[in-house]
Image (cartoon, grey):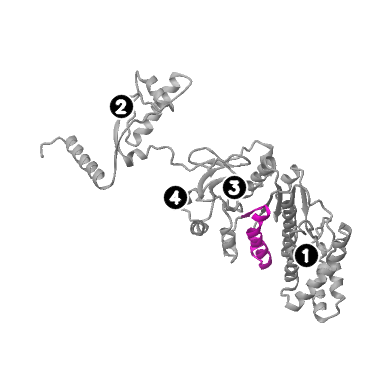
Amino acid sequence: MDIMPADLALFLTEMKKLLQDLQSRNERLFYFTFMIVNTETSKDKLDNIVFGATSLAGKHNCILHRLDYQQEQGFMSCLPLGKNLIDIRRCMTTTATAGFVPFTTCELFQNGNALYYGINALSSNLLMADRKLLKNPNGLILGTPGSGKSFSAKREIVNVFLITDDDIAILDPEAEYAPLVQKLNGQVIKISPLSKQFINPMDISLDNMEEENPLILKSDFILSLFEVMMGKVQADERSIIDSCLQQVYMPYFVDPKNTQMPILKDLYNTILERNSPQAKHIADCMAIYVTGSLNVFNHRTNVDISNRVVCFDTKELGNALKEFGMLVVQDQIWGRVSRNRNDKKSTRYYIDEMHLLLGKEQTANYTVEIWKRFRKWGGIPTGLTQNVKDFLCSPQVANIFENSDFVYLLNQAGGDREILSKQLNISPHQLSYVTNSGAGEGLLIYGSIIIPFIDHFPKDTELYKIMTTKLEEV
């Protein structure tokens, strides 16, 4: 053994290792041929590409041999004909052979009304998906500021507008969706104490009277508004509000015209007529929203909320009216979903800065109700937030995640990554795609599929100028 050549000793060691793999690791042997086709428009360019490929393989201790005088046979062997015309074979184990199998990348490409969600970061194939095919189409778009969160939502909104017949509703607390909505000939509703555009929280839809009493749903919503106005509503006060509601809506049920639609002042006057201490307490709490400085919601609706694309701008609503106003918007969207359900039409609902809704008890409860019930009514809600920690601090967030089969993850902060990995069962390797990633790069979670994506939108387009929120580009 001392005089055995070094290469022979190495071969003997490798052979013993191979024999051990075959005996104890359930490995098999395969005859294997691996070929690469290089194409170019000229001989010089082709030589450069072959040289580059050889150098790249050499860095990894792999030697590539050019098929001199066998180029035609090699090219024919690479075509999907199932015939190998090259008599050059290597003997490899199962594990070694599996490394060359190209079908290890998960893909997502659906037909029909599938929307574009970027390019697969591993295979460069298009990601085309239809959220309606999911068990639960509710979605979340999560990312740090500047990661492309709002841009991704706008890109999906444009695709929905062009490819489907779905209606689109947007809750916009930062006033950044108006340019896009206006280009789509949609309706931007600016809700603020100084605005002349009004939404009536007493609006009620009679479309579903055959299936259920619409007053039951409206009563539940109005009681939520009183929780905001009064802080706490006692049982006897609830009874007074409920009975007054039935009295206020009676003329409208008899003659359902817009001029008969009640407003908050009608309810206020009806409650005052009860002439009891409880009724007076309720009316006193309502006064600031009816006759006081916060009476922006004491008017009949004077905007077109039936437009296919409706954006509710709540940026200037103020802290005193923020929770009240968001509840009113949620109720309007619920009514829209209810009407569209009868027409067999879906409604897409986009909630920007969703953590604002989950920060207050009443709006959080209403949002969770949407996440639980919208699917049955043809609604597809999508929540966007950058403050993932604030979002995850809400006691209601578990219901949101459990009822969302679509998650669009962009770049995440360190603490958020750890929380999301446990919440969404993401591996450390997959987390690397949302660690210091560029704008429009991250992970797409579609049901049980997790795919890294890249979505670099061309900047020299009119659409980009409308959708971007970067200050230097606006």
Say which residue appears at 38% left-offset and 29% top-offset: 35
Q: Quadrant of the C terminus?
A: top right
In front of the other: label 4 or label 2?
Answer: 2
Residue at x-position 10% and y-position 36%: 3
Give me the C-alpha separation between circle 3 and circle 4. 28 Å
C-alpha separation, residue under disc 4 versus residue under disc 2: 36 Å
Tag of residue 133: 3
The circle drawn on residue 145 is: none
Could you tell me how far apart the alpha carbons at marks 1 and 2 are, in whole angstroms?
Answer: 79 Å
Disc 1 residue crowd, few under 14, some 14–19, many 20+, Cα 10 Å? some
Upstream in sequence: badge 1 or badge 2: 2
Whether residue 136 is visible: yes
Name the foreground residue: 48 vs 80. Answer: 80
Residue 405 image position (x, y, % from top left) = 57, 53
Q: Residue furthest front?
A: 210
Spatial distance from mark 3 to mark 2, Cα to Cα? 47 Å
Which secondary structure lies at badge 2? loop
Looking at the image, do the residues carrying marks 3 and 4 touch, with CB atoms under 8 Å apart?
A: no
Give the residues in magenta.
355-384
Q: Is residue 370 magenta?
A: yes
Residue type indicated by callout 1: Leu
Q: Which residue is painted at 82% across and 77% down in the image? A: 279
Which residue in the structure is indicated by mark 4? 429
Depth order, front residue of 28/15:
28
The answer to whether one can see residue 291 in this image is no
- In this rendering, which labeled residue sits more in front, label 1 or label 4? 1
The amino acid pointed to by label 2 is Ile
Horizontal relation, residue 200 to residue 410: left or right: right
